[in-house]
Image (tube, coloured by chain):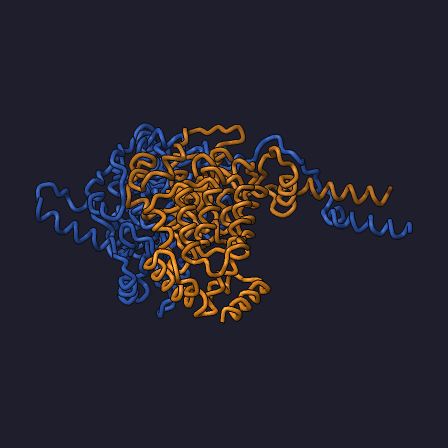
Chain colours: A blue, B orange
Amino acid sequence: MAALVVRSVRDLLKRADFAKVPRRHRHKKKWAATEPKFPATRLALQNFDMTYSMQFGELWPSIRVSLLSEQKYGALVNNFGAWDHVSAELEQLNARDFVNKAHARGEQEPESSQTAAPSPASWACSPNLRCFTFTRGDVSRFPPARLGSLGVMDYYLMDAASLLPVLALGLQPGDTVLDLCAAPGGKTLALLQTGCCRNLAANDLSTSRTGRLQKILYSYVPQDIRDRSRVRVTSWDGRKWGELEGDTYDRVLVDVPCTTDRHSLHEEENNIFQRSRKKERQILPMLQVQLLAAGLLATKPGGYVVYSTCSLSHLQNEYVVQGAIELLANQYSIEVRVEDLSHFRKLFMDTFSFFPSCQVGELVIPNLMANFGPMYFCKMCRLT
Amino acid sequence: MAALGRQVSAWYHLIPLTWARMSRQTPQKKMTASSLCKLTTASTGGGLEEVPCVQDPACRTHLPQCLLEKQSAPVDGGPWEREEVITSLLDMGFSDVHVNELLTVQPGTHPQQVLDIVSELILLGVNPEPVCVALKKSPQLLKLPVMHMKKRSSYLRKLGLGEGKLRRVLHCCPEILTMRQRDIANTVRVLRDKCLFTVQQVTEILHRCPYVLREDPGELEYKFQYAYFRMGVKHADVVRTDFLQYSITKTRQRHTFLERLGRYQTPDKKGQTQVPNPLLRDILRVSEAEFLARTARSSAEEFEVFKKLLAREEEEEPENPMPGDKSTMHGTVPQHDDPAPSVSWAEGNCCEAGPSNVRLSVCENFRFKCLVFIIFD
C-alpha cells in the first residue's frame, strides 16, 4: 500500500514537471498577474490611434482599416532571368507594370505642357525597373515566385511602394551606390536590377539580417554580377560611414530602421512596441538623424541621397530630414538641398495614394483600393 | 357497399395514421373532394348523401381523422356539416368572403378539418383576419392532423406565444406549426441554456424574430456569442435590437469594418469605451448606403474591397482571430437567476477552451491538490 502511494506521488511530481526543468530556470508562476498583459500589436495600435489621428485627422480611419487589412504586393521582375517571358506571364494574370505606365504618362505630359516640365535630371527615374501590380480594387494575389530557366528566381514579391525610393534615386549608368541599411534586400535587389551600379555597397548592422540579404542575392542574381567586387555586403555601424568612406558615392539610399507601422500591427515577434523595447523606440528618431547624416557625408558633392521609412509618423520622416540638414549645416558646413518630387508624385498617382500635405518629401498612405505602403521618401542633393 | 365502407373506416381506426401517409394520399383525395365541392355547392344541401366517400376508399382517410375528434358525426353528413362549419366560422368572427376563402384555399380539405385548424388558431389568440392571411400564405397548415395541432398549440402556449403574439410569428415563419417539436425545443434550449436568456426573453425573441427557428441552433449560439463577446452587447439589447435576425456575415462585415476604422470598440468589463460606439440600429438596421454614409463615413468601393478581403481572411484562418480583432470568443457569461446551466457552461469553458492559461492552471492545480489530498487522507 505504502509503495503504491509513493509511486503515485512520484508520478504526480513527474507530471508537474518538477524533475525536468533545471533549478536555475525554475520559478513560481503567478496565478493572477497584477498587470494585464497587452500584446505588442495592440500597444502599437493604441500608439497609432493617439498620434496619427491628430496627424491625419479625417484620413486616419481609412488608413487604419487599410493597415489592419491585407496588403497588396508588387512583383519586381528579375532582369537577370527571362524577364520578357515572365512579364508576359504576369500580364496574363491581369497585372500591369506600373513603372512602364508612369513612364508612358511622363512622356505624354511634357508635350501638352512644356513649360511646367522641370529639368530631367532632378526627377529622372531609375531605368530598367519592371514591377507588376494589380489594378485599383483588385485583390488578387501573385503566386509565389519560382525558379526560372536561367537558375534565378522569376520575380521578387514586395510592397510596390518600396520601389519608389529606388525609382526616385534616379540612378545613372556607372554610378557607385551605397545602401546604408540594406536588409532584407528588396531595395538592394531593385538597385541591382537597374543595371547602373558600377559598385554597390550594401550594409546592415545586424549579421542575421545581412545573412537574409545574401540569401536573396544568391537566389536572384547570377554569380558573375554578385562577385568580382561589384557587390559588397558588410555589417558595420552605418552611423560611422561618414568617417569610413566620406565623399565616395554618387547615390546613397538611406532606408532607416523605423516603427514599421504595418508590420508592428500584425507581428508579435520582434515587435518594436513591446514594453521592453521602449527605450529603443524613443531614441529611434535620433538614430535616424545620425544615419541620414552619415549617408549625406558619404555622398560626393553633387550626389543624391534618398531617405526612406515605412512609417507614417512625421517625427520619423520630415523632422528627421530637417534635423539632419540642420545638423550638417551647423557641424560640417555642408549644404544640402531637398529636391521637389511633386512631378514624380503625379507620375505614380494612378497606382498609389499620396498624402497631400507633406512639407518635404512624399508619403504613400495605405488605402483599401491601393493597399500599399506606408512609405515615406525624400530626395536630397548634397551641394558642397 | 355501405357496409364495406364502414369496415374500411373501422380499419383506419385501428391503424395509427401517420402524417406521411396522409400526404401520400392527397392527390387522389384532391380529385374526389373537388367533385364533392362542386356537387354540394350546386345542390345547396340535400339528397346527395353517398357522394363524398363511397366512390373511392382512399378518400376515407380524412374522414376517420374527423371522426377521431367528433365521434357523433355520421359518414353521410357532408353538405349539412359544411353548413354547420360555415356558421361556426361566421360565429368566430369571419366575414363571408373570408369563409369562402378559407374553404377554397386548399381544395380537397374537409370542412371540418378547416374548422378544427382555424378554431385552434383562434383559441391561440390570433384574430380572424391574420388567420386568413396566414392560411392563404401557407395552405399546407390546413392539412395538419388535429391532434398534432392541439399538441403544438399547447406547447406554444407554454412558450408564451399565445394571446396576440402569434400573429407576427405566423406571418414570418408558419413552419412553427409544422416543424418537429424537437427542433423548436432545441432552439429554445440553446437560447435558454447556452445563451442564458430568461424565459421572458426567449418568448420575446421568438415573437420578434421568428426566423431564429429556421436557423441551425449551433449557428444561433455562435451569433449570440459574437454579439456578447465580440461586440459587447448585453442580453437585453440582443433582444431589443432584434440582433439575432441579421445574418452573421452581414453583422461581421459591418462590425469588423467599423472596428478597423476605429469607430467601434468592444466595451470593457465596466462597459466603457474610448470612442462613443454607434447605436446597433445604425449599424445593422439601416441600408448599406446609409450605413456607409452616416455610420462608417467611408466609400462604397472601399467597403466592397473590404468585404472581399474579409471573406478571404475567414476562409483562410477560421480558427484564429485576426490581429485586428482583439478579444477572443471565449469567456463566461455572467450568471443570472438560473444557476445550474450557467455553472456547467463555465466549467466546460474552463477546462476545454479556457481563455487564459491562468484559469487552466488553476483548474489543474486544484485537481492536483485534490488528488494529493485523497491519497494522504
Q: Position of residue A191 (x, y in %)?
A: 32, 53
Q: Position of residue B54 (x, y in %)?
A: 45, 68
Task: Tell me: residue B45, above or below residue B92.
Answer: below
Image location of residue A36, percent across then percent down: 57, 33
Please state if B62 lies on the left or on the right of A97 as rendered.
right
Residue A204 appears in view: no
The one nearer the camera, B76 or A106, is B76
Q: Is residue A188 above or below residue B123?
A: below
Q: Is residue A240 above or below residue B16?
A: above
Say how many tags the image has.
Answer: 0
Residue B365 percent across, percent down from the top left: 72, 41
Name the residue located 43 percent from the left edge and 33 percent from the top edge: A47
Residue at the right extreme? A1
Q: Nearer the viewer, residue B295 or A263?
A: B295
Residue placed most toward the observer, A312 or A194: A312
Instruction: Please identify the quarter of the rendering in which residue A265 is found.
Output: top left
Q: Residue furthest front?
A: B47
> In the picture, which quadrant includes the C terminus of chain B?
top right
Viewer-proximal residue among A56 and B318: B318
Mark yes or no: residue B7 visible: yes
